[in-house]
Amino acid sequence: MEAREATATGESCMRVDAIAKVTGRARYTDDYVMAGMCYAKYVRSPIATWLCRKY
């Protein structure tokens, strides 16, 4: 294996999406709406041995 010179070690670098995240303009997967999109909800029983029959 050859020894290579590291070019980023110890240097700070700006993230590509940093400004968008800080200003609130970044788009996340929850922000996208598509035609015919379905939604799901996770339902749990309040007691471990019970079954959820209605929600």
Image (cartoon, rainbow, N blue to C red):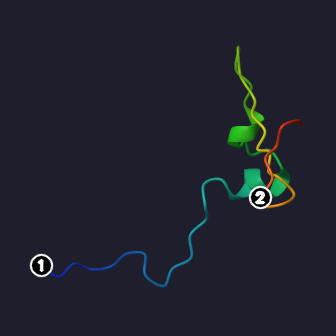
The label number, if any, that marks residue 49 in the structure image: 2
Q: Residue at image x 65%, y 53%? A: 17
Q: Residue at image x 70%, y 14%? A: 36
Q: Residue at image x 12%, y 78%? A: 2
Question: Depth check: 11 or 25 in front?
Answer: 25
Identified by mark 1, the residue type is Glu
Residue at the far front: name it: 49
* Residue 21 x %, y %: 75, 54
Q: Is residue 10 above or below residue 45?
A: below
Residue at the far bottom: name it: 10
Pointer 2 local density, CA inside 10 Å: few below 14, some 14–19, many at least 20: few
Whole-number angstrom distance, CA of label 2 to CA of label 1: 60 Å
Q: Residue at image x 10%, y 78%? A: 1
Query: Sequence-wise, which precedes: disc 2 or disc 1?
Result: 1
Identified by mark 2, the residue type is Thr
* Residue 30 x %, y %: 74, 39
Camera-near label (2 vs 1) is: 2
